Image (tube, helix red, strand yellow):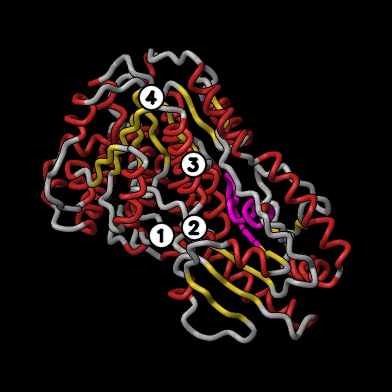
Amino acid sequence: MNILIVHNHIPKPDRGGSELRLSQLIDVLGSEGHSLTFVSLNQCSESKYFNSLVSCGVEVFAGDSERLTLHGIQIPRLWAFKEVIEGHSVDLVILTLWFWNQISIPEHYMDDIRTARPNVPVCVLMDDRHGLRQRQLAAFSHSFTLWESANDYVNRESEIYRRCNAVLAIAPAEAKTARTVAPDVPVFILPFSAPVSADGRSFEKRTGILFVANFSNIAALHSMSWFLRSIWPEIRARLPNVSATIAGTKSREVLPRPIRGISVLGHVDDCADIFGSHRVFVSPIPYGTGIATKNVMAMSFGIPVVTTHFGATSLEIISGVHALISDRADGIADEVVKLYTNPGLWKSIAENGAAHIRDQFSQLRLEEGVREFLSTQISSQLDSYAVGKRSIHLMDRIDPSLREAPSRLECTKIRVGWHLETGDDFVSHHDFESALIQYRHACSWVANSLAHFPEYGRLLVGFRKCYTALNDCEGIHRCELELGRTKQTIPK
């Protein structure tokens, strides 16, 4: 089978869970004898990852100049997606779903694929419930714009699932979400595979507490802040001689100053040694969906995990059996101290956790999931809902100034202004639901800094008009609170 895979970038399996899962899927598809073509929206900055794909027999195209222009990024045109999709034999397309570039891969590519290859099934690979995770972040941050961008993600995710021919979920919880919003679309579970550790170092031969994260992720920054502010002092007060290690991408950049009792390793290419040498793995995840890959990896290496209910999401683990779980800082500290000082409890949790991961996240499960998916006859037909251009792309096809933007920042400013103007126009025609869609698009582009946008007050008033017309009391209340908090000048 000839399979086309499209992702935001060339996968870096040593940098994050979703990257590892995608790399494993590519390996399994290749080992099953399928011919693979990989398209990366962004250029590849590190040749070792590009070369790794090529060495596996994958044909790679990186840096889609046509689409990057829509983000204010100008690069030489070396190839075009239209030429790739029309010039290759394609039996199946897999599109990954993330909103890293605000416009997801399915939103960027699905229409062109449907036009060029109307009889080819298009599948969406999901790792996360992005709208739900964004809502959790909004609640954690008390952010109006993050809440509205979460509403935007929820609507767009649902639309993407309904428009594709199959969803490839990472775990049952994610599969349930896809089935709920798109009951007619088949859903398959393709987990990632955790390594089986041969390192069985005992309680006595391990020392210290380990914290690992990818600090490019805002949730990891919040987790680390919570650990250092509220959890680590509690642990040190009861175990004054214990040390902790913080490792992961950008850990040295975010923690440049020494912290008593803590060493910072930075990015680690192979985590086997640090997982095998530390006694307790602490993972205070304050919010999130999908699978916490670091927890799975730690458990697979036989290091007991202390985490939150968010960190246990989709792992199907039982607190006190496979790991220890608490959502309070003092509770997490208590559980860490218990594991660190009780050899019997440590051994029980370590063994049970490792056995659970071997059973639920094995290479065999991934291979069986892939075979089941590929052996199923997937229709390429679309229902009437899937026809037509999406609202997130209206501007791309109407306003030529977008392609002339000199930078990503200027491009974003143009987009936010356009969505605001379009929303206001819908309001003037009393189409408040369409206006909400446009206002939420604006929030998604600069959710963390939209409050500094010169016309933020105007946007808030637009939201308030929509929620008032739609009798949404909760929405009105949020708008009033945000208007009062920001003290924006309210346009008449």
> Are dots 2 and 4 in contact, CB under 8 Å?
no
Sequence order check: which comes first, mark 2 or mark 3?
3
Q: Please, what secondary structure does the residue beneath circle 4 have?
A: strand
Sequence order check: which comes first, mark 4 or mark 3?
3
Q: Is residue 296 above or below residue 163?
A: below
Along the line of sight, the residue nearer the viewer: 231 or 260 = 260
Q: Which residue is mark 3?
A: 24
Q: Which residue is mark 2?
A: 143
Sequence order check: which comes first, mark 1 or mark 4?
4
Sequence order check: which comes first, mark 2 or mark 4?
4
Sequence order check: which comes first, mark 3 or mark 1?
3
User: Horizontal and vertical percent for residue 116?
Assistant: 23, 21
In magenta, the rendered stretch is: 283-299
CA separation, marks 3 and 1? Answer: 33 Å
Q: Which residue is mark 1?
A: 448
Sequence order check: which comes first, mark 1 or mark 2?
2
CA separation, marks 2 and 4? Answer: 35 Å
> Are dots 2 and 3 in contact, CB under 8 Å?
no
Residue sitting at the far right: 344
> Are dots 1 and 2 in contact, CB under 8 Å?
yes
Judged by depth in the image, the label closer to the viewer, 4 or 3, is: 3
User: Horizontal and vertical percent for residue 462?
Assistant: 36, 46
